[in-house]
Amino acid sequence: MRYEVNKPDVVDESVDGEALIVHLGTGAYYSARGAGDVAWQLIAAGKSVEEACQSHSFENSVLAAFVEQLLAEELIRARTLPPSEVNGLVSVPGEPQLEKYTDMQELLLLDPIHDVEEAGWPRAKPAAPGT
Amino acid sequence: MTPLSTPQTAEIPDSAQEIFGDAFVRAAEVSGGVVCMPFALGPVRFTFEFAGPALRPPLGAPFEHLRTEGAGADVTIRAWDTESTGVQLPATLPTPGSVYAQSLPVMREESDCRWAYFRPDPGLTLFDSRTRTGIYWVPAASSLTYGDIAGGFRAIIAWAMAERRMQFLHSAAVAYRGKGALIVGASGSGKSSTALACLLGGLEYLGDDHCLLDLQPEPRVHSIYAAAKLHDAQLTRFPELDPFVVNRERVAPEKGVAILYPPFAQLLPRTRPLAAVLVPQITGESTTVIEPIGAAAALAALAPSTLLQMASADRGGLSAMAELVRRVPCYRLRLGTDREEICAVVTRFLETGAE
């Protein structure tokens, strides 16, 4: 199974060994440091769990659980295209972990901007969890 | 007032520009013409066109430090209100209240280059990227909130500048001797207090909540608003700004807005190169300290609040912010309680420490 970043709702950047992932639809954002950054970049590029484990020495069950978490948070989705090249990504010791932050969600609810879908009609923002 | 000219809408049938532009023209006709205000944001020339005089003072004042004299504009923003002109929003639209209450779209979008939204109180903001024209409507000048004044037209500006690869940021900025420092973080992190402490201590001020990032050829910050948003406690802490508050009746339920031009004209540059990104942290301790932090920590402080506050603006903004923290050194600003010391530490840092 291959995955890709759930664009356009999700944007990400890796800086200094840490991936910052922002879900613009829910207002949550995430940090994956060290091994988590490596795992995120590999999975986002379309590498399968097996391929990533082989190339960067992850334990299969650990990486599979990390991918399940990414799916549950709707940060990635199934991919049909072949994987992208990932160059110069060095293995980092440790297990990949995803930290979730929700302190910015109120900003999304305060700003009633409606995004425009490709079909042409704006899409109302989803309500925050628990509202 | 400038005589009314016909907007250039002929080749855009059924567009937002036509629907709202016609209403703007009627509003200008009944209120005596267009009040123009040319100004520049970085290298981009803007012109405000207000239908009549009502909206010009509250919405134009924060941009006075950016005024230009030349004719011609890259972006035109047309604004009118119903109370002073009698011109309603076009009747084909749902009424503003029902639109917002139901979270329904304002109007049909026929391409991916136009957006619109209603604010809750209500209002309309729209940008047509084909004509590079923004449209702004509110029921009355008196309905403008502190955010409308101190952050006026922010969606239009963000959309227009994103086309020029400039990123609207949720940040403050100050400068000293030609070196700018971007101050980033979520609301309540100390951005505004740091910027205002620095302003009142004699540093240059480029904004307390919104700035514009330009990465080419070097990272720079452009000022947008010569205004400061102050809640009650900040007015107590910065009493020097009290005489310049323009919305005193709204301070208690909302925030006060102090207009900083002309009183601080000498400290309001249009733009400065960036030497540092500062991430403030309120500590409750007596002394203020600056210490290096990683780029990732600075990006986490800057990016989510910017992206989520401007959710329908440029989604490529995260890469611009990542490039910023890769190119400019980042620091934690551990804020002490002494306002004057905060300014002194930032001044000393920009004078000697920032590279």
Image: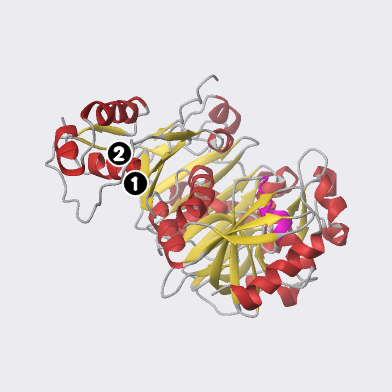
* Residue B332 is one of the magenta-drawn residues: no
Chain where mark 1 sits? B
* Residue A70 drawn at (x, y percent): 33, 31
Residue B171 visible in the displayed image: yes
- Residue that sits furthest to the top in the current view: A130
User: How many numbered discs sit on the rendered protein?
Assistant: 2
Tell me the amino acid under the disc marked 1.
Answer: Asp
Left/right of residue B319 with respect to residue B276 in the rendered view: left
Q: Residue A39: name its quadrant.
A: top left
Which is more toward the observer, A13 or A109?
A: A13
Question: In front: B78, or A1?
Answer: A1
Chain of the residue under the numbered disc 2 shown in the image: A
Q: Is residue B190 magenta?
A: yes
Q: Is residue B67 visible?
A: no
Labelled disc at residue B348: none
Name above or below for residue B270 compared with residue B285: below
Judge from the rendering whether residue B37 lies leftward or rightward of residue B145; answer left or right: left
Labels 1 & 2 near each other (Cβ < 8 A): yes
Near mark 1 (Cα within 10 A), the count class, few <14, some 14-19 or many ≥20, is some
Q: Nearer the viewer, residue B149 or B177?
A: B177
Measured Cα–Cα span from mark 1 to mark 2 = 7 Å
Magenta residues, start to end? B188-194
Where disc 2 sits, the SS reads: loop
Of all residues, the one furthest to the front in this rendering is A93
Name the residue carrying label 2: A118
Residue topped by disc 1 = B112
